[in-house]
Image (cartoon, rainbow, N blue to C red):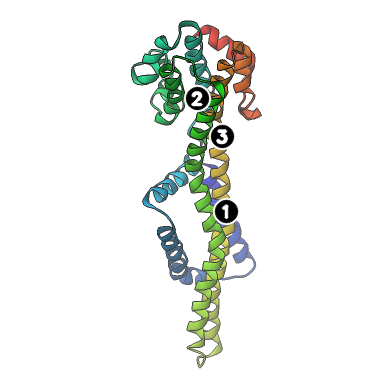
């Protein structure tokens, strides 16, 4: 929503200010399609050269996320804490055998079914079930630090994949001004080939060439850069769900009481999205 509004405001202010200053949009609009073809086409080619198909698909998903917003809601973050806490409570009270069916087949688990959004999310279920499956296989004898290292590696891999589109968008933002210069230089070369033309024709040709520089800078600092920044913010919000899961598992394995387990997970959430500890405790008692 705000991304689309921001793009509209950007274009209206830039081109509106140009027109109010006495500029004519006609020459700019006439040159824009070919200049955009050169700059945008060069950017697309660079993406294809420097990335695998998997990375390109991630880029498409990242751009979609910018417009749709975070994948996980505040309720999802809270539910992830509650779900993991329930599983760890079951492990402590009834042992690894009682936990096995829930973590090996989360799709049919009665505990997971209380949180259908998370149950249908393969990334979250894997982040919860994989380390707990290790606990089941080892009959709960694994060292807590070893489990923490496994979770850290899983989170690191997931974050790398989530952050890749943001890095690609930022690389485009860095490249757009140079690609705009490429388009402008080609326009100047074309102008030099028509140096015998009258000044009014040469002026139009030089103006068209400069549209390339303008477009490259506008795309870099007005579009691509802010899109990359917004995607980074969204990913930071979504990634916290993995850290909350980790905190619940590790704090539980250390034998901390449930209020301290919940606080360890809750305190890592951003202040604007952090529930009260009392609300979490009431929710755990009510379910």
Q: Which mark is residue 265?
A: none
Residue 251's place in the image compared with 13, above or below, is above
Q: Earlier in the sequence, mark 2 or mark 3?
A: 2
Percent coordinates x, y for residue 237 in the rendering: 56, 34
- Secondary structure beneath dot 2 equals helix
Residue count near mark 1 (Cα–Cα under 10 Å), binned few <14, some 14–19, many ≥20: some
Q: Identify the residue under disc 2.
A: 76
Q: Identify the residue under disc 1.
A: 225
- Of 205 and 69, nearer the camera is 69
Most distant residue in the bottom direction: 196
Q: Which of marks 1 and 2 is nearer the N terminus?
A: 2
The answer to whether residue 25 is visible is no
Percent coordinates x, y for residue 42 in the rendering: 44, 65
Residue count near mark 3 (Cα–Cα under 10 Å), binned few <14, some 14–19, many ≥20: many
- Of 70 and 54, nearer the camera is 54
The CA span between labels 1 and 3 is 19 Å
- Secondary structure beneath dot 3 equals helix
Residue 4's place in the image compared with 107, above or below, is below
The residue positioned 44% from the left and 58% from the top of the image is 50
The answer to whether residue 146 is visible is yes
Q: Identify the residue under disc 3.
A: 237
- Number of residue marks: 3
């Amino acid at each position: 929503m705000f991304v689309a509004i921001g793009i509209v405001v950007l274009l209206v202010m830039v081109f509106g200010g140009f027109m109010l200053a006495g500029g004519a949009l006609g020459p700019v609009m006439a040159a824009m399609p070919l200049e955009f073809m050169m700059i945008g086409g060069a950017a697309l080619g660079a993406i294809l050269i420097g990335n695998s198909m998997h990375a390109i698909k991630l880029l498409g998903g990242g751009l979609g996320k910018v417009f749709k917003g975070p994948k996980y809601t505040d309720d999802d973050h809270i539910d992830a804490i509650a779900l993991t806490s329930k599983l760890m409570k079951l492990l402590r009270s009834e042992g690894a055998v009682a936990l096995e069916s829930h973590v090996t087949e989360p799709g049919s688990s009665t505990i997971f079914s209380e949180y259908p959004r998370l149950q249908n999310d393969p990334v979250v279920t894997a982040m919860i079930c994989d380390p707990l499956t290790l606990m089941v296989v080892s009959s709960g004898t694994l060292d807590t630090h070893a489990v923490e290292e496994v979770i850290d590696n899983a989170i690191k891999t997931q974050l790398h994949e989530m952050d890749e589109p943001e890095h690609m968008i930022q690389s485009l933002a860095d490249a757009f001004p140079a690609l705009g210069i490429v388009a402008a230089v080609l326009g100047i070369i074309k102008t030099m080939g028509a140096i015998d033309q009258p000044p009014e024709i040469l002026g139009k040709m030089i103006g068209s060439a400069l549209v390339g520089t303008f477009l490259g800078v506008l795309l870099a600092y007005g579009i691509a850069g802010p899109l990359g920044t917004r995607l980074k913010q969204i990913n930071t919000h979504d990634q916290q769900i993995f850290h909350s899961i980790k905190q619940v598992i590790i704090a539980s394995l250390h034998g901390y009481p449930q209020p301290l387990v919940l606080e360890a997970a809750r305190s890592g959430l951003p202040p604007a999205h952090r529930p009260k500890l009392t609300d979490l405790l009431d929710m755990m008692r009510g379910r």
